[in-house]
Amino acid sequence: MRRLRNLDPASLVWIALVAVLLLLVAFPMAKLLLVSLHTRSGAFTFGNYLAAYGRARYVDSLVNSLLLASETAAISTVFAVPMAWAVSRTDIPGKAAIWATVLGAFILPPYLGAIGWILLAGPNSGVINQVWRFATGATDPLVNVYTFHGLACVMAFQSFPLIFIFVKSALDLVSSEMEDAANILGANTWVATWKVTLPLVWPSIVGGAIVVFLESVALFGTPAIIGIPARINTATTQLWQFFEYPVRVEVAAAYAMPLLLIALVAIGAQRLMLHRRGFVSQTGKGGERRPIVLGHWRWLAIGYCGFVAAVAVAMPALVLAEASFARAWGRGLSPSNLTLANYRFLLFEHETALATIWNTIWFSAASASFAVVLALLVAYIVARKLVRFAGALAFLATAPFVIPGIVMAIGFYASFAAPPFSLYGTAAIVVLAFTARFLPIAYANAAAAMGTLHPEMEEAGRILGLSRLGTIRRITIPLLKRSLLGGWLIVFIVATRELSAAIFLVGPKTRTMAVLLYDLSEAGNFEVLAALGGILLLVTMALVGIGMKLLGRDFMLRRA
């Protein structure tokens, strides 16, 4: 007790920080493993793994997820790399519009994009197929979203911004001198790009593709909305079925463990592929980056970027907007079919819509606030090397990056749903799960910000009598407030659209907009669903506008 009394407040904060990180990250994963190895009565067993993978259907679901994620990553790479190269290295016009496309695809929730493509490419009533039949008289659909490749394409439309950001950031650092040398040796622009420029950014391409692969394996909304009607079962939809009555959390835990191993193997494979390979271009301050003049080829580049913009953002957004104002989807765009009744129903008549909007806002705000505070404290300890185990704190803060969101949700269910916590269905478990889920985003932002802050200002404050915590409050936070605000906004925005974690943890009184949207999709109520999606997008766009005003036009994409 004496030792505790003699500890200064800062040391108590560091101890509390370790406890919180262990509770949010280590404890759920450890509990998940323990639950997977025990019966409900507490006896040790491997039977849960036999139950989880004892049927061919369950194994096929995992294989489907791996194949689907691989195809999604490949298509996303095809979309993203040419666009990133065009924006970073060429004189293509309309770069601001391309950035807007990437940002639009980034903020459009995946399940809303999936609904948009159901309305566009449904085999019977999809707009594209209706136009196709009217124009050609054909009976078969031109495109069908309810196929394996259709599902992969829709997921790629939502995922390609991740690879775009990785690759463009790397291309911006490559000097034109390398390409000039290749041109002198006889290579034309395309050969130099293929053999010189792209190999230099290969780590970013691989890194982005692996991130998309991991996100796709763990994605729930799009595979559920499109895959279940198409009878394409995936690992995430199979996990959801384990949570149907009667809930088999121990079997779900066993089924989820390979997803965690897949994430770890993917990250390890990335490091192994890039091990002992040099990808550095030594340019110094004099390295020039001159845009490549495309000439007539610019129209091909513009057309390609326009195609990606159309399929990823414009087409699904427009069809969702039309559906949100329609009396009945399928009657076409006509004055008699336009109405505000869907929005009026949600805002004034629906039993839970307003509650889900409020839940989404305050859950996301609380999660963003907790994540930023935790991230700042960890980043401060790591940057200033205040404790011996600072590296372990950084590991805990970044570990959720390699933990699929749906696995973390099941870990939280196993850890906190039952006594003594009994948090299932409460706001607390949702906020804690969101905080843990998006802590790596906040930490990456805070760590980068701390790297730009010289400790001299803090040392001056300490000399003048400020405590360590007082220094953080009065000097560090004010100097980093713009960066911290940017991190807060990003965590808030991604939390508002989170479905994979929320759907396993919410109760009747804590449903979020994402969960309500999924429920409406199951009921086939596309008009009201589109209106609720419109409200969610308005909230998101308002926050993005605030961020652009305060932090710059590309604040989300710089930190993504």
Image (tube, grey):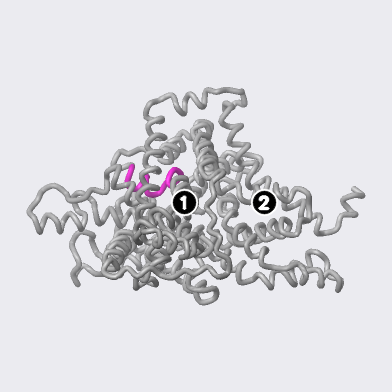
Q: Earlier in the sequence, mark 2 or mark 1?
A: 1
User: Residue at 26% across / 69% down in the picture?
Assistant: 296
Where residue 557 appears, as percent x and y from the top left, is 48, 64
Instruction: Answer with the quarter of the image where residue 245 lies.
Output: top left
Q: Is residue 504 above or below residue 460?
A: above
Where residue 469 appears, as percent x and y from the top left, is 78, 64
The amino acid type found where label 1 is placed reads Trp
Q: Residue furthest front?
A: 185
Who is closer to the viewer here, 185 or 32?
A: 185
Marks 2/1: CA–CA distance: 27 Å
Q: Secondary structure at mark 1?
A: helix
Residue with the mark numbered 1: 202
Where residue 85 appears, as percent x and y from the top left, is 40, 61
**How dense is the environment of label 1, judged by Cα within 10 Å: few (below 14), some, or many (20 and up)?**
some
* Residues marked 2 and 1 touching at CB (< 8 Å): no
User: Residue at 53% across / 31% down in the picture?
Assistant: 250
The stretch of residues the image draws in magenta is: 216-227
Checking the image for residue 319, the label placed there is: none
- Can residue 49 be seen from the camera position used here? yes
Residue with the mark numbered 2: 394
The amino acid type found where label 2 is placed reads Ala
Where residue 345 appears, as percent x and y from the top left, is 35, 64
Residue 455 falls left or right of residue 229: right
Instruction: Answer with the quarter of the image where residue 338 lies.
Output: bottom left
**How dense is the environment of label 2, judged by Cα within 10 Å: few (below 14), some, or many (20 and up)?**
many
In the image, residue 225 lies in the stretch drawn in magenta:
yes
